Image: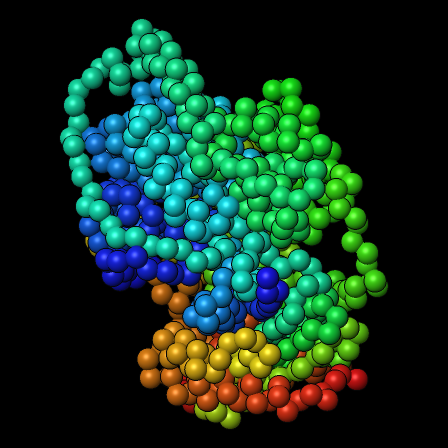
Amino acid sequence: MLKTTNILIVGVGGQGVILASELLSEAAMTAGMDVKKSEVHGMAQRGGVVSCHVRFGEKVYSPLIPRGEADVALAFEAAEGMRWGNHVKEGGMLVVNTQQIIPTIAFTKEYDYPEDPIGELGGFKCRVVPIDGMGIATELGNAKAVNTILLGAISGDLPISSEIWEKVIRRRVPRGTEELNLKAFNKGAEIVKNATNLTVK
Amino acid sequence: MAKTQKLPEIKEPTRMLMSGNEAIALGAREAGVYFATAYPGTPSTEILETFSRLPGIIAQWAPNEKVAFETGIGAALAGARTMVCMKHVGVNVAMDPLMTFAYTGTIAGFVLVCADDPEMHSSQNEQDNRILARFAKIPMLEPSDSSEAHDFFKLAIEISEQYATPIMLHITTRISHAKGIVELQPWIEPQVSGFEKNPERFVMVPQYAKLRHHEVESRLKELLKYSENSPLNRIESGEGNVGIVTGGVSYQHVREVMPNAPVYKIGMSNPMPIESIRKFADSVEKLIVVEELEPYYEEQIKAAGIKCEGKGNFSLEGELNPERVAEGLARAGVIKAQQKTSVPVQIDVLPRPPVLCSGCPHRTVFNALKKLKADVFGDIGCYTLGALKPLNALHACICMGASIGMASGVQLVKGSNKPVVGVIGDSTFLHSGITGLLGMVYNQAPVTIIILDNRATAMTGGQQHPGTGTTLQGEPAPAVDLVELVKATGIKNVKPIEAWDLDNVLKVIKETTESGEPSVIITQHECMLYPKKVKPHPYQVELDICNGCGACIRIGCPSIMTIDETTEKGLHKVTIDPETCTGCELCVSVCPLEGCIVEMSESLTENV
């Protein structure tokens, strides 16, 4: 039996984490695989952490990825990369958006937002790829494309063809933004492909 | 929620990726359910929301779970297939009709969908409601993923009608909010056969209820035979001589950890298929029970004299996942403890607790209560977040509607020398606050109740309720007048005020708490997210005036941030995020400096 692929997508409420996980799950299903997806979003609208587990393969049982067994983690926010990096297996990949969303709690005396969250990621035993999603999206002319840029960034090693990705993106993104989102997706894929030697520290 | 769009009819078998909640809604439509009702509650909310988008059915929000359940009884006795959905603690509210509806039994299929929340992702407790199905003496099915949630719902309707009993479909957060592939089938047209009088069956006075109790016990014996022989409960043979009994989402975790072990998979867990489990137990050397929270299976298996191990190896707290199942099975000596080649790297990073939104009208009230050092009794909703830092202005929260009773109790025993206040949202007040208020007035408890009226059931996604003036589908509906309702309970001192006006909120709370009479303040301001996300109306900080005192930071607004720039004393100045600031002016009210926080000039807001 084929091994199950485990993808963890995390971020902060309102960033589009759930939509990204939907696109990925649908692409995997369209590719003929069994898919399970689990999310915690009860407090998402209130600035809390959102996490989605996406698993696909020949037959998927649990909707949850065992800790330390994610093949890829995609963090939409820099400090969330720090929180979730240890869910990635050795030799896996952590793609992290360099955007920082500083919670209100960081302005109280007890907590500080990390000085250099991306720099902290070097300790994880996986490949770490930081991406300036917001910067690239702005270059492409729409800040809302961060989502698809990041999704493109993790698409490289997945058993999902570019035709399927295109089909799913066209079907799911708002009308009129199809070309922009496809461009964003390809841009994300390209960056990671060319970033083989990108390590932190 | 705005007017909802209808979903297209399913005319031929279709494969779709769906959450358990969506799968149940579609399963209900396929099963010919005509009437569905609920009160919102995580993780169950999306079942009714999805069902409401299907054509040819009736879907309604009820003021609370008890009313939902009772309305559902009426629909089912009138011969319409019925679904009632609620979260685990909602069943506590509906327990009264549930216990006796089991006696009368139903005419058309009646499914109670109960969504538990092990791990308390968004709940005040993690009670295991499987026990309640057994207590109520109704059958219970436990699906283990979306596909089964869909299929089991349809079977639940069949069982309900075959045995004339209400039935519980028991799910958990990881069924509700996990997605999987579901095979959808064409729909059938719902029917309503009409109510027929039958007092001996439907009027539960002692002489009739005794007969019906006897019927319940006979029905359970028949249901036991069904359970023993149903394919819902099945043996999956495998390798090795340790057998595992499991059900619900735990089955999936077990299969993840031990794909080839012999497993007894429970799909119908009341009545428990004990003899069938006994056969399975005889075929293995050791029997392990894996289930979340309570030892529900384990106790019944042990009571039948079957040797097994269960909670000795697994926690009574929290949800299970593959890791926790593996740890438990290792403790039971079934698998080897996982060899950790190296200690996983763990980086400490600050928590990200949920906060009240920018401009949230509740924030003003909590800042006022904090200033008055009041003892505050809270309730269930977004405003429970008032308990967290930096507000720390809510000091007890138990369940829906409890704020009013708790605050009354404190005052009746003269248990506080501070202002005593109860805070409750509009939806929660209508759910179960009204009776608390009646008690408070009747017994003259000198309490100030603040109804935080933001015109939405905000925490669960902004659902409509009897005070919003619209239905679940966004159609116009009569809206209750909260002021008149409160007056009708006997409260003489009712003050509806604007929630954003801190000075007045402070003044009115002070006056009413000092008045020594039962009073109600209704703070009014629409939610920032529902029915529509409020557009930014940004304010800005004049950095040459800001002295870094931090007064605005302490109101806990997510739009206000400290910056690197410091004052001569080394205090950090602040800035306001123009993309999220709503212009509520609470920060202006607490800022000690004139002209420090001002409305952003139009030329600057153009780009926002």
Q: Is residue A201 above or below residue A80?
A: below
Residue B247: which quarter of the image?
A: top right
The residue at the far right in this view is B342
Give the position of the C terminus of chain B as an image quadrant.
bottom left
Q: Residue at x 39, y 15 (%)?
A: B218
Q: Is residue A101 above or below residue B368?
A: below
x, y percent for residue B90: 45, 37
User: Is B197 on the left-hand or right-hand side of B48?
Assistant: left
x, y percent for residue A115: 74, 77
Residue A16: in sight, yes or no? Answer: no
x, y percent for residue B278: 59, 26
Residue A179 vs residue B540, the one in the foreground:
A179
Residue B27: in sight, yes or no? Answer: yes
Q: Residue at x 20, y 50 (%)?
A: B56
Give the color scheme: rainbow, by chain, secondary structure or one colour. Answer: rainbow
Q: Residue at x 53, y 78 (%)?
A: A151
x, y percent for residue B364: 51, 58
State the count of labels: 0
Give the position of the N terminus of chain B as an image quadrant.
bottom left
Residue B353 vs residue A109, the one in the foreground:
B353
Q: Residue at x 39, y 88 (%)?
A: A179
Residue B605: which quarter of the image?
A: bottom left
User: Is B524 on the left-hand or right-hand side of B304?
Assistant: left
Q: Is residue A191 above or below residue A37?
A: below
Residue A130 vs residue B274, the one in the foreground:
B274
